[in-house]
Amino acid sequence: MCDCGNTKEFYLSNIVPKPNARYTKSCGCQRIRIVSEKNTKHGLSKSKFYKRWRSMFDRCLPSYICSSSYTGISVSSEWKDFGKFKDDMYKKYLEHKKINGERNTTLDRVNPYKNYSKENCRWATMKQQANNKKINYDVS
């Protein structure tokens, strides 16, 4: 009987610990748990927050539909790691989303001429973002 409560039959030689050898430690439930934990780094891969992070990279690609607006724009090296982006922006994202709703919470560059970074990004409504275009931005 496994620690999880399942019952499974094994050869005795497969369940007795041996030095420097592999042996069965569970009915298979441990393997499922370990693989699941290994493949799940943050648990947000299906969230809008994660999609906002991924979209940031897509906008910087030359193939992006509005790529002329993003020429020369890149993502800071720190934010290439989702964990760092989450540390910097998740709390503010949740606050903005609570007030404005998830659909009306977009990642916006404060200065549209500068890159995506902690210092130059904020959560904004669609209206705020629409008003923050390169042609409307005072570079002085």
Image (cartoon, rainbow, N blue to C red):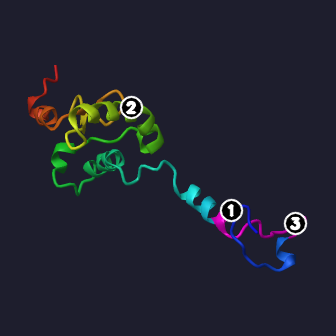
Q: Residue at x 32, y 42 (%)?
A: 74
Pointer 3 or 1: first along the chain = 1
Which of the 4 image quadrants contains residue 46? bottom left
**Residue 91 disc label:** 2
82 up-or-down from 120: above or below: below
For mark 1, what is the residue?
4
Name the residue nearer the viewer: 99 or 74.
99
Pointer 1 or 2: first along the chain = 1
Q: Determine contact: label 1, label 2, CB under 8 Å.
A: no
> Element under label 3?
loop
Q: Residue at x 42, y 49 (%)?
A: 44
Where does residue 37 sit, x and y in percent of width and height? 58, 55
Q: Quadrant of the N terminus?
A: bottom right
Classified by dominant secondary structure, the portion drawn in magenta counts as loop
**61 horizontally vs 67: left or right:** right
Q: Nearer the viewer, mark 1 or mark 2?
A: 1
Amino acid marked by disc 1:
Cys
Where does residue 62 sit, x and y in percent of width and height? 24, 54
Amino acid marked by disc 3:
Pro
Q: Residue at x 87, y 65 (%)?
A: 20
Mark 3, other Cα within 10 Å: few <14 / some 14–19 / many ≥20: few
Mark 2–mark 3 distance (CA, rounded to whole Å): 46 Å
Specify the segment rendered in magenta: 16-31
Magenta span contains residue 128? no
For mark 3, what is the residue?
17
Mark 3–mark 1 distance (CA, rounded to whole Å): 19 Å
Amino acid marked by disc 2:
Lys
Name the residue nearer the viewer: 105 or 68.
105
> Element under label 2?
helix
